[in-house]
Image (cartoon, rainbow, N blue to C red):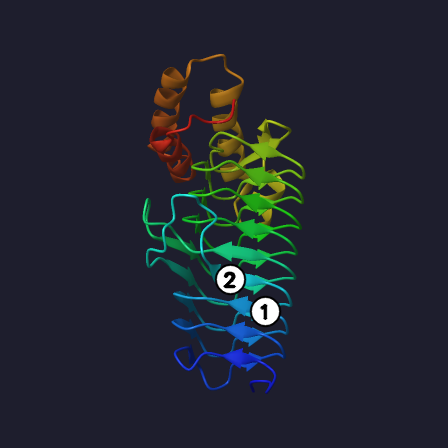
Amino acid sequence: MIDPRAVVSPQAHIAEDVQIGPFTVIGADVVVGAGTWIGPHVVINGPTRIGTGNKVFQFASLGDAPQDKKYDGEPTLLTIGDRNVFRESVTVNRGTAHDKGVTRIGNDNLLMAYSHVAHDCQLGDQIVMANCATLGGHVEVGDWVTMGGLSAVHQFTKVGAYCFIAHNAAVTRDVPPYVMAVGRPAAPHSVNAVGLQRRGFSAQQILNIRRAYRVLYRSGLKLKAAVEELEKAAETQAEIRPFVEFIKRSERSIVR
Protein backbone atom coordinates (compact mmCIF):
# COMPACT_ATOMS: atom_id res chain seq x y z
CA MET A 1 0.00 0.00 0.00
CA ILE A 2 3.10 2.26 0.21
CA ASP A 3 4.62 3.22 -3.12
CA PRO A 4 8.30 2.21 -3.23
CA ARG A 5 9.21 5.74 -4.28
CA ALA A 6 7.79 7.20 -1.06
CA VAL A 7 10.12 7.98 1.85
CA VAL A 8 8.66 6.87 5.18
CA SER A 9 10.63 7.22 8.40
CA PRO A 10 11.05 3.99 10.37
CA GLN A 11 9.97 6.03 13.40
CA ALA A 12 6.55 6.74 11.81
CA HIS A 13 3.57 4.57 12.79
CA ILE A 14 1.43 3.80 9.75
CA ALA A 15 -1.68 1.61 9.90
CA GLU A 16 -1.51 -1.45 7.65
CA ASP A 17 -4.13 -0.36 5.12
CA VAL A 18 -2.88 3.22 4.66
CA GLN A 19 -2.10 4.11 1.03
CA ILE A 20 0.86 6.39 0.35
CA GLY A 21 1.66 7.70 -3.12
CA PRO A 22 5.00 8.20 -4.87
CA PHE A 23 7.48 10.85 -3.75
CA THR A 24 5.60 11.48 -0.51
CA VAL A 25 7.75 12.03 2.61
CA ILE A 26 6.54 10.93 6.05
CA GLY A 27 8.78 12.04 8.92
CA ALA A 28 9.50 10.61 12.34
CA ASP A 29 6.87 10.74 15.11
CA VAL A 30 3.98 10.71 12.64
CA VAL A 31 1.02 8.45 13.37
CA VAL A 32 -1.46 7.74 10.54
CA GLY A 33 -4.70 5.90 11.28
CA ALA A 34 -6.47 3.20 9.33
CA GLY A 35 -8.22 3.86 6.03
CA THR A 36 -6.24 7.01 5.28
CA TRP A 37 -5.17 7.79 1.72
CA ILE A 38 -2.13 9.99 1.13
CA GLY A 39 -1.43 10.98 -2.46
CA PRO A 40 1.84 11.75 -4.22
CA HIS A 41 4.25 14.57 -3.32
CA VAL A 42 2.84 15.08 0.19
CA VAL A 43 5.05 16.03 3.15
CA ILE A 44 3.98 15.14 6.70
CA ASN A 45 6.32 15.95 9.57
CA GLY A 46 5.89 15.28 13.25
CA PRO A 47 4.96 15.21 15.91
CA THR A 48 1.65 14.70 14.07
CA ARG A 49 -1.31 12.43 14.85
CA ILE A 50 -3.72 11.66 12.02
CA GLY A 51 -6.92 9.71 12.63
CA THR A 52 -8.83 7.33 10.39
CA GLY A 53 -10.28 7.71 6.91
CA ASN A 54 -8.53 10.93 5.96
CA LYS A 55 -7.53 11.94 2.43
CA VAL A 56 -4.47 14.06 1.69
CA PHE A 57 -3.96 15.24 -1.88
CA GLN A 58 -0.76 16.13 -3.70
CA PHE A 59 1.61 18.83 -2.50
CA ALA A 60 -0.09 19.23 0.88
CA SER A 61 2.20 19.95 3.85
CA LEU A 62 1.01 18.84 7.28
CA GLY A 63 2.71 19.14 10.65
CA ASP A 64 5.69 21.24 9.79
CA ALA A 65 7.17 23.84 12.14
CA PRO A 66 5.05 26.92 12.91
CA GLN A 67 5.69 30.11 10.99
CA ASP A 68 6.43 32.05 14.15
CA LYS A 69 9.70 33.90 14.88
CA LYS A 70 9.39 33.00 18.56
CA TYR A 71 9.41 29.27 17.79
CA ASP A 72 12.73 27.75 18.84
CA GLY A 73 12.32 24.08 18.04
CA GLU A 74 10.16 23.13 21.03
CA PRO A 75 8.26 19.82 20.72
CA THR A 76 4.76 20.79 19.63
CA LEU A 77 1.96 18.85 17.99
CA LEU A 78 -0.60 18.66 15.20
CA THR A 79 -3.63 16.45 15.80
CA ILE A 80 -6.11 15.59 13.05
CA GLY A 81 -9.34 13.68 13.60
CA ASP A 82 -11.21 11.40 11.20
CA ARG A 83 -12.53 11.65 7.64
CA ASN A 84 -10.97 15.00 6.81
CA VAL A 85 -10.02 15.95 3.25
CA PHE A 86 -6.95 18.07 2.54
CA ARG A 87 -6.86 19.14 -1.09
CA GLU A 88 -3.92 20.25 -3.20
CA SER A 89 -1.25 22.42 -1.54
CA VAL A 90 -3.02 22.77 1.80
CA THR A 91 -0.67 23.76 4.63
CA VAL A 92 -1.25 23.04 8.33
CA ASN A 93 1.39 23.92 10.95
CA ARG A 94 2.02 22.53 14.42
CA GLY A 95 1.41 24.56 17.58
CA THR A 96 3.84 26.74 19.51
CA ALA A 97 5.10 26.65 23.08
CA HIS A 98 3.61 30.11 23.60
CA ASP A 99 0.03 28.84 23.45
CA LYS A 100 -1.60 25.40 23.66
CA GLY A 101 1.35 23.72 22.01
CA VAL A 102 -0.99 21.95 19.61
CA THR A 103 -2.93 22.68 16.44
CA ARG A 104 -6.17 20.67 16.38
CA ILE A 105 -8.44 19.75 13.48
CA GLY A 106 -11.61 17.82 14.26
CA ASN A 107 -13.62 15.47 12.05
CA ASP A 108 -15.24 15.60 8.59
CA ASN A 109 -13.66 18.86 7.49
CA LEU A 110 -12.91 19.86 3.90
CA LEU A 111 -9.88 22.07 3.36
CA MET A 112 -9.82 23.01 -0.29
CA ALA A 113 -6.77 23.83 -2.41
CA TYR A 114 -4.21 26.29 -1.01
CA SER A 115 -6.06 26.85 2.27
CA HIS A 116 -3.85 27.43 5.32
CA VAL A 117 -4.22 26.64 9.02
CA ALA A 118 -1.57 28.36 11.13
CA HIS A 119 -0.08 27.33 14.46
CA ASP A 120 -2.27 26.76 17.52
CA CYS A 121 -5.55 26.94 15.59
CA GLN A 122 -8.44 24.92 16.99
CA LEU A 123 -10.95 23.66 14.39
CA GLY A 124 -14.17 21.82 15.12
CA ASP A 125 -16.09 19.46 12.84
CA GLN A 126 -17.77 19.74 9.43
CA ILE A 127 -15.90 22.92 8.44
CA VAL A 128 -15.40 23.93 4.81
CA MET A 129 -12.49 26.17 3.93
CA ALA A 130 -12.72 27.08 0.25
CA ASN A 131 -9.72 27.71 -1.97
CA CYS A 132 -7.08 30.00 -0.45
CA ALA A 133 -8.98 30.54 2.80
CA THR A 134 -6.47 31.39 5.53
CA LEU A 135 -6.40 31.22 9.32
CA GLY A 136 -3.83 33.21 11.28
CA GLY A 137 -2.31 31.75 14.42
CA HIS A 138 -4.40 30.91 17.51
CA VAL A 139 -7.73 31.08 15.65
CA GLU A 140 -10.75 29.09 16.87
CA VAL A 141 -13.37 27.91 14.37
CA GLY A 142 -16.60 26.24 15.49
CA ASP A 143 -18.52 23.37 13.92
CA TRP A 144 -20.23 23.70 10.51
CA VAL A 145 -18.47 26.96 9.57
CA THR A 146 -18.09 27.73 5.87
CA MET A 147 -15.30 30.04 4.70
CA GLY A 148 -15.43 31.38 1.17
CA GLY A 149 -12.49 31.52 -1.18
CA LEU A 150 -9.72 34.03 -0.39
CA SER A 151 -11.23 34.81 3.02
CA ALA A 152 -8.92 35.29 5.99
CA VAL A 153 -9.20 35.32 9.78
CA HIS A 154 -6.85 37.43 11.90
CA GLN A 155 -4.80 35.75 14.63
CA PHE A 156 -6.46 35.16 18.03
CA THR A 157 -9.93 35.58 16.48
CA LYS A 158 -12.87 33.25 17.10
CA VAL A 159 -15.52 32.20 14.57
CA GLY A 160 -18.65 30.69 16.09
CA ALA A 161 -20.48 27.57 14.95
CA TYR A 162 -22.66 27.69 11.82
CA CYS A 163 -21.12 30.95 10.58
CA PHE A 164 -20.67 31.78 6.93
CA ILE A 165 -17.62 33.86 6.05
CA ALA A 166 -18.09 35.32 2.58
CA HIS A 167 -15.47 35.09 -0.13
CA ASN A 168 -12.68 37.66 0.13
CA ALA A 169 -13.78 38.65 3.65
CA ALA A 170 -11.16 39.81 6.15
CA VAL A 171 -12.22 38.84 9.67
CA THR A 172 -10.48 40.95 12.31
CA ARG A 173 -12.93 40.51 15.23
CA ASP A 174 -14.91 37.59 16.63
CA VAL A 175 -17.93 36.41 14.64
CA PRO A 176 -20.78 35.08 16.84
CA PRO A 177 -22.49 31.78 15.97
CA TYR A 178 -25.01 31.73 13.11
CA VAL A 179 -23.78 35.01 11.57
CA MET A 180 -22.92 35.67 7.94
CA ALA A 181 -19.95 38.06 7.77
CA VAL A 182 -19.04 39.99 4.62
CA GLY A 183 -16.46 42.57 3.59
CA ARG A 184 -13.00 43.91 4.38
CA PRO A 185 -12.98 44.30 7.32
CA ALA A 186 -15.78 41.79 7.79
CA ALA A 187 -19.09 43.10 9.14
CA PRO A 188 -22.29 41.25 10.07
CA HIS A 189 -24.59 40.88 7.08
CA SER A 190 -27.38 38.58 8.24
CA VAL A 191 -28.14 35.23 9.81
CA ASN A 192 -26.83 32.18 7.94
CA ALA A 193 -30.41 30.96 7.55
CA VAL A 194 -29.77 28.65 4.60
CA GLY A 195 -26.96 26.91 6.44
CA LEU A 196 -29.11 26.52 9.56
CA GLN A 197 -31.96 25.07 7.52
CA ARG A 198 -29.60 22.55 5.95
CA ARG A 199 -28.37 21.56 9.40
CA GLY A 200 -31.88 20.74 10.59
CA PHE A 201 -32.81 23.85 12.55
CA SER A 202 -36.58 24.33 12.66
CA ALA A 203 -38.33 27.38 11.25
CA GLN A 204 -39.06 28.53 14.80
CA GLN A 205 -35.44 28.15 15.88
CA ILE A 206 -34.26 30.15 12.88
CA LEU A 207 -36.85 32.83 13.68
CA ASN A 208 -35.58 32.98 17.26
CA ILE A 209 -32.01 33.36 16.00
CA ARG A 210 -33.09 36.13 13.62
CA ARG A 211 -34.68 37.95 16.53
CA ALA A 212 -31.52 37.55 18.58
CA TYR A 213 -29.49 38.93 15.68
CA ARG A 214 -31.77 41.97 15.51
CA VAL A 215 -31.37 42.57 19.25
CA LEU A 216 -27.61 42.51 18.89
CA TYR A 217 -27.22 44.39 15.62
CA ARG A 218 -30.39 46.33 14.79
CA SER A 219 -31.92 47.43 18.09
CA GLY A 220 -29.49 50.27 18.85
CA LEU A 221 -28.81 48.78 22.27
CA LYS A 222 -25.32 48.91 23.71
CA LEU A 223 -23.62 45.54 23.91
CA LYS A 224 -24.19 45.04 27.63
CA ALA A 225 -27.90 45.78 27.33
CA ALA A 226 -28.23 43.59 24.25
CA VAL A 227 -26.60 40.65 26.05
CA GLU A 228 -29.00 41.09 28.96
CA GLU A 229 -31.93 40.85 26.53
CA LEU A 230 -30.43 37.79 24.87
CA GLU A 231 -29.90 36.07 28.21
CA LYS A 232 -33.62 36.39 28.91
CA ALA A 233 -34.43 34.80 25.56
CA ALA A 234 -31.90 32.01 26.17
CA GLU A 235 -33.85 30.90 29.25
CA THR A 236 -36.53 29.41 26.99
CA GLN A 237 -34.69 29.17 23.64
CA ALA A 238 -31.73 26.79 23.86
CA GLU A 239 -30.40 27.83 20.45
CA ILE A 240 -29.71 31.34 21.81
CA ARG A 241 -27.48 30.11 24.63
CA PRO A 242 -24.39 29.48 22.40
CA PHE A 243 -24.89 32.97 20.95
CA VAL A 244 -24.83 34.54 24.43
CA GLU A 245 -21.92 32.46 25.75
CA PHE A 246 -19.80 33.25 22.70
CA ILE A 247 -20.31 37.00 23.09
CA LYS A 248 -19.49 36.87 26.79
CA ARG A 249 -16.16 35.08 26.22
CA SER A 250 -15.07 37.24 23.28
CA GLU A 251 -11.69 38.86 23.87
CA ARG A 252 -11.20 40.73 20.60
CA SER A 253 -14.76 42.13 20.60
CA ILE A 254 -17.32 41.00 18.06
CA VAL A 255 -17.91 42.16 14.50
CA ARG A 256 -20.21 45.19 14.52
Q: What is the secondary structure assignment of the residue under circle 1?
A: loop
Name which residue lies at 38% across and 21% down. Answer: 229
Placement of the N terminus among the 4 image quadrants = bottom right
Name which residue lies at 54% across and 18% down. Answer: 218
Query: Between marks 2 and 1, how big is the CA–CA gap?
Result: 8 Å
Residue 85: x, y in percent? 57, 64
Along the line of sight, which residue is nearer the eye, 229 or 6? 6
Q: What is the secondary structure assignment of the residue under circle 2?
A: strand
Q: Are marks 2 and 1 in contact (CB under 8 Å)?
A: yes
Name which residue lies at 49% across and 12% down. Answer: 220
Type of amino acid at the residue the image marks with label 1: Val
Q: Is residue 102 above or below residue 254?
A: below
Along the line of sight, which residue is nearer the eye, 40 or 243? 40
Mark 1 neighbour density, 10 Å: few (under 14) some (14–19) many (20 or more): many
Left or right: 144 in relation to 252: right
Residue 163: x, y in percent? 54, 40
User: What label sits on residue 145 in the rendered view?
Assistant: none
Along the line of sight, which residue is nearer the eye, 163 or 71? 71
**Residue at mark 2:** 62
User: What label sits on residue 42 in the rendered view?
Assistant: 1
Q: Is residue 139 above or below residue 245?
A: below
Res 193 → quadrant: top right
